[in-house]
Amino acid sequence: MDPADPARRTSLALLAGASMAAVLPGPRPMAAMDQGAPASGLVPRAPVGIVAVRDDGTLALADGDTLMLTATRLPHETDLPPAHHGPDDAARVRAWRAAALAWLRAMCQDRVAYPWVPRLGRDRHGRLLAQARVRPGPPGPPGRPERETGLWLQAGLVAAGLARVDTLAGAANGAGRLLILEALARRSKRGVWADRLYNPRSPDRTWPWVGTFQIVRGVVRDTARVRGRLYLNFGADWRRDFTVMVDRPKRTDLDPDEVLDLRHQLVQVRGWLFPKNGPMIALDHAAPLETRVWLD
């Protein structure tokens, strides 16, 4: 990535993302969406000055609150399982994280945040969860048109290849647009997508990455419903091969019948890999499961 003009690169990527909306899955029509809202279903919060970008990627706000940027995951040392990678790989991840934080600090310096809050408004640490736009102060009303409300931080990070999409149940608003930008960045090898450490994994190469957040891409070999749970099996031996599980489908926005119809379909799924009869990702909402995959 050429850091000489990150704002220009972000603008170009956002324009490209808009042109791909008809090709990749995106959000449903949002005729009633507020002007300036990054996505539908978000509630505007009063604009507030940004005091600092902390080392953990959160924004320290002038009113004393802490804003956690939803739906994105910055590069982090936990992206690597220690047993399978050496100091050179760790140094590369630290460099990507430093680049992401530098981008955030440049975009937030002397800026006002316009938070848009999802249904899940706070995390377990009490931090404000929000999609955020930033623009120079002083604060204005949160319903201004997009050209006045400024840069959507999550979209800028993802478009620059400095963050992956990582959503929470109840706070996945905007995931469709962000996934488009991520696919564009990955295809253009921007940011982390130029680094093999962040390549999407094939299902048969997930074992070494257990304990980390990963994107896995492959063909579903079989599907099953067992004692109320849904399973997507990607190998012949479900006791050892990669599997996706939906524990309580009725409590999610996933359609059980559509999930079971994914047999022999190419999908892309993201989440934390954990060992349970082989590497597994558990889903509690729909956004991490992509059924229309744009190949790199």
Image (spheres, rainbow, N blue to C red):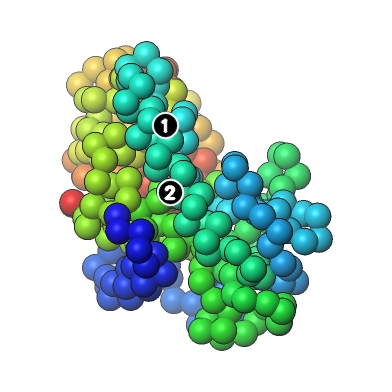
Rendered location of residue 120, percent (x, y)? 66, 52
Residue 44 sits above or below residue 221 on the image: below
What residue does disc 2 label? 99
Q: Give amino acid for label 2.
A: Ala
Rendered location of residue 83, percent (x, y)? 37, 13
- Secondary structure of the residue carrying tag 1 is helix
Please name the residue shown 45% across and 42% down the image: 97
Please name the residue shown 28% across and 47% down the image: 193
Please name the residue shown 46% across and 44% down the image: 98
Q: Residues within 10 Å of mark 2 (few under 14, many from 20)?
A: some
Q: CA distance from mark 1 to mark 2?
A: 16 Å
Quarter of image, res 131: bottom right
What residue does disc 1 label? 79
Please name the residue shown 24% across and 25% down the image: 205
Rendered location of residue 9, percent (x, y)? 34, 67
Q: Relative to the observer, which residue lies in front, 287 or 174? A: 174
Residue 183 sits above or below residue 7 on the image: above
Q: Is residue 40 visible?
A: no
Residue 250 sits above or below residue 275 on the image: below
Q: Give amino acid for label 1.
A: Asp
Residue reaching furthest to the right = 63
Residue reaching furthest to the front = 4
Mark earlier in primary sequence (1, 2): 1
Rendered location of residue 260, percent (x, y)? 33, 41
Instruction: Classify residue 155 as left or right of residue 217.
Output: right
